[in-house]
Every structure is written in C-alpha cells, then in structure tokens.
Amino acid sequence: MTPDWADTVRVHPLVVRITHWINVFAILIMVASGWRIYNASPLFGFKFPSDWTLGGWLAGALQWHFAAMWLLALSGLTYVTYGIVSGHFRRKLLPVAPAAVWHDVAAAFRGKLAHDDLRVYNAAQRAAYLGAILIGIVLVLSGLVLWKPVQFYTLGLLMGDYEGARYVHFIAMAALVLFVIVHVVMVLLVPRTFPTMFTGRARVSATAKGD
Amino acid sequence: MKRLFGMRESLKSQSRPRIESIERRLFLRQGLSLGAVALLSGCDVTNPESVQKVLWAMSRWNDRVQGWIFNPNRLAPEFPESAITMPFPFNAFYSMDEAPSVDAASYRLELSGLVRDKKPWTLPELYALQPQVSQVTRHICVEGWSAIGKWSGVRFSDFLGRIGADRSAKYVGFKCADKYWTSIDMPTALHPQTLLTFRFADQILPAPFGFPMKLRIPTKLGFKNPKHIVAMFVTNEYPGGYWEDQGYNWFSGS
C-alpha cells in the first residue's frame, strides 16, 4: 500500500533524483571504460582485470568514454546548476564545520552515527557529498586536459601538464570510487534511505524517530 | 524546498480527492523520469549492434565538436632539447624490424585530388624545400603515454601552397609505404606547427620513425601523424583511416 500523502515528507527533489541515477549510469560507464583505457598504458605496476572493464579493446573503451562523458557533463551540470541556483546545496550541504565532520565520522566508525530525519544530512554526509562534487569537478577538468592538452594547455599547467593530468585524473577516479563504495555501504546500513532516491519521499514517522 | 514544504502543508488541509489526483500526477512524473533515463541510456543496451551505432554516431559528433574547439592559432607547447625523451619509443601496428625500407632513389611522392600541380616529387626536390623549420614537441599516443621529440622539415601549409592545394577542401589524405593510411581536417593541415618532416633528432628520418617523410602534427594524437608517406590527396569525401575505420576517433585532436 502506498503511504498516505499526509504521512510523507519530501526528501529529495525530482531534479536531484533524476540526475543522481543518470550520474550513476554515466559514472559506471566512465569508470569501467576508463580502466580499459588505463590498461593500454598503466601508470602504476598493475592493470585492471579485463572482466571489470568496458569496451573490449582500447578503441571500444574510448568510444564508450567519449560518449558517456556527454551524459555525465549534461547531468552533472544540471545537478550542480540546480544545486546552486535553487539553494539546494546551501540548505542541505552547508554549513559543514570541520569539527562536526570529525565528530560525525568518528561516530560513524563507532556505529553511532544517526541519520534519523532523512531530510537533514549529518556533517559526515555533507562533507562526503561536497567532496564527491569537488572530485567530479576535478575529474572533468583533468579529463578535459587529457582530451585536449593543447587547447586547454593553461588549465593543464595547474596539474603538471599532460603527464600530471594523467595522475590527477587517476587519483580523482580512485577517490570517487572510494566515495561510491562508502556511499553504497552506508545505504546498506540505513536501507530506508534507498527508496527515497526513487520516490523522493519518506514517511513522517520514519523521520521523526530517534533524537 | 521550503516553498515546496509550504505547499505540502497547505495541501494537508485540502480534501482527499484533490490529494489523490496530485499523487497520481507525481507517479506519472516519476514514470516519465524513468523513461527519460532509459532513453538517455542509448536505446536497447542488450543489442550490441544498436549500441555500436550509438557509439559510432557519438564519435562522429565528437569529430564535429573537436573541429569547433580547435583553435588554428593555438600552438602546442614547445620544449627545450634537454626535455627530449631518450630513447624515443617506437610504435606501429607491426614490430620495429618490420618497418618498411623505402628506396630513396626511386621514391616519388604522388599527389592527387584537389591540387593544381600533381607532378610527383623526388626526395632531393623535397629536401630542397624552403624554409626549413624544427620543433621539439610532445607526441601523445592514443594509448596514453607521451614522449618529446625533435622533428625538422617544412611547414605543411607552405607545401600545400606550393602544390596549389584547394585550401577550402575538407580533408587531406595520406597513403604510406607500410600500407597505413590516415586523413586529417584542412584547418589542422594548415596549422603553423603541422610539418612535413624529413629529419628526426637532427638525423635523416630512421626507417622505424618514418623514412623518408613523416607528417608531424603536435595538435593530434600519434596515430594521426603518418610515417613513410608515399601519396597524398586533397578531397571533400571523408577518407577515414587504418585505425579510424576500426573505431579510433577520426579527429583525435589535442
């Protein structure tokens, strides 16, 4: 039975839900094809298992990467623009005080972190989501330098030209994958957050308990 | 969000049927958003052929975008000779000892397509071209690695002028002694750093690095820099290339 309208509150705006799932799809493609591209000329002493990659060979992986980048750019830009213009970021992700983040991260490791009102992010969440947005920006900018090292030469100087950008792009990818793993583990620990990213709503009773 | 919550508050006080119709609308809207996700995901992902079509279409789109991004006045960075990579990596679709051996005496560069003067060029005639220029630039491979090298020759735009090439044509295509072929866009062909080179590291181009002639384009990936060129043509028909026809992006510009 669907919950009564009056019984639920809005947790995630529609734009956030749509862009979230498009981003999930695009990032999966970007990471899996990116690993295949990495394998063509590894920066470090390892390769990603072929089964975890997308594209079949380098050209196929590049095609996936340079197709999905448009999806990610459109969706990511929509999300960030919406977040700034609507005040969504300001309301949900700010303020984020370092002391509070530290406190909440420590609480999370003791299994004592509360996320009872799904409308309000705790400090650890705020830091993580802001961090993911920043990582996304670094990924896009370093990706631009790798794609167009001559046209975006000045931007490339910020990250050590073409060769530096390869490391920046890789490290940002690793940070994003780490974020995704932590994010998914957190959703598994607090499973009632999962349907809200589809429906956008949560029961009032579910948000009112605790605290 | 506050405004939306406000709306919800006011709805609370309204009658049940009205609320249900809004709930239906919300459901519909969510259904539509899921449809949009399916659409954006590139049709039927279970059918590799349709996926391939979308990927190729996106690659053609990326060719166009790169053409717009390409700034004909932006120069690739040049480096001091101390930055040159030693030894310079060899890369081709065959191993180093399979590089073609071109006979200098009988060599002729064949010209065709939209050029006024189609007279073939001998190697001494090519070597006599002026003015000679050098560049120390970064060669970036599609695989990801890069290496800095020094190439010397003449500006390709000067050569295109000498042979009376139609500069308003879209493409310049190349055929190579190793059966390789590729093609580039005219704006890149006319770029001041695009050189028809005869020397590498101050020596006559060694066989593995493209004897007798390599087109050096520091604004394109390595595979767009043809070696062992034996024929070139100017055309408006998309010529493709050895790697390009297999899936590598055609423009592949830096």
Image (tube, grey):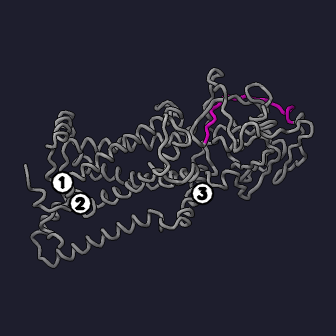
Residue A119's disc is: 1
User: Residue at the top extreme?
Assistant: B82
What amino acid is found at the position of numbered circle 3 in the picture?
A: Arg
The chain that hosts pointer 1 is A
Labels 2 and 1: the sequence-earlier one = 1
Q: Which residue is mark 3?
A: B60
Q: Are marks 1 and 3 in contact (CB under 8 Å)?
A: no
Quarter of the figure with residue B21: bottom left
- Mark number displayed over residue A133: none
Q: Which residues are drawn in magenta?
A: B126-141
Q: Are marks 1 and 3 on the same chain?
A: no
Q: Check the residue under mark 2 and report the chain it is in.
A: A
Q: CA distance from mark 1 to mark 3?
A: 44 Å
Instruction: Specify the quadrant that holds the N terminus of chain B.
Output: bottom left
Q: What's under tag 2, amino acid-wise?
A: Thr
Amino acid type at circle 1 is: Arg
Residue A196, disc: 2
Tell me residue B36's x, y (percent): 39, 66
How far apart, in angstroms, are the residues tagged by discs 2 and 3?
A: 39 Å
Across the whole image, how many numbered discs are drawn on residues? 3
**What percent of the width, then of the height, locates residue B237?**
73, 59
Q: Residue at 18% across / 54% down in the picture?
A: A119
Q: Is residue B246 visible?
A: yes
Q: Which residue is painted at 18% across and 61% down in the image?
A: A202
Q: Which residue shows up at 40% across the image and 43% down it?
A: A137
Point 69% across, 41% down: residue: B92
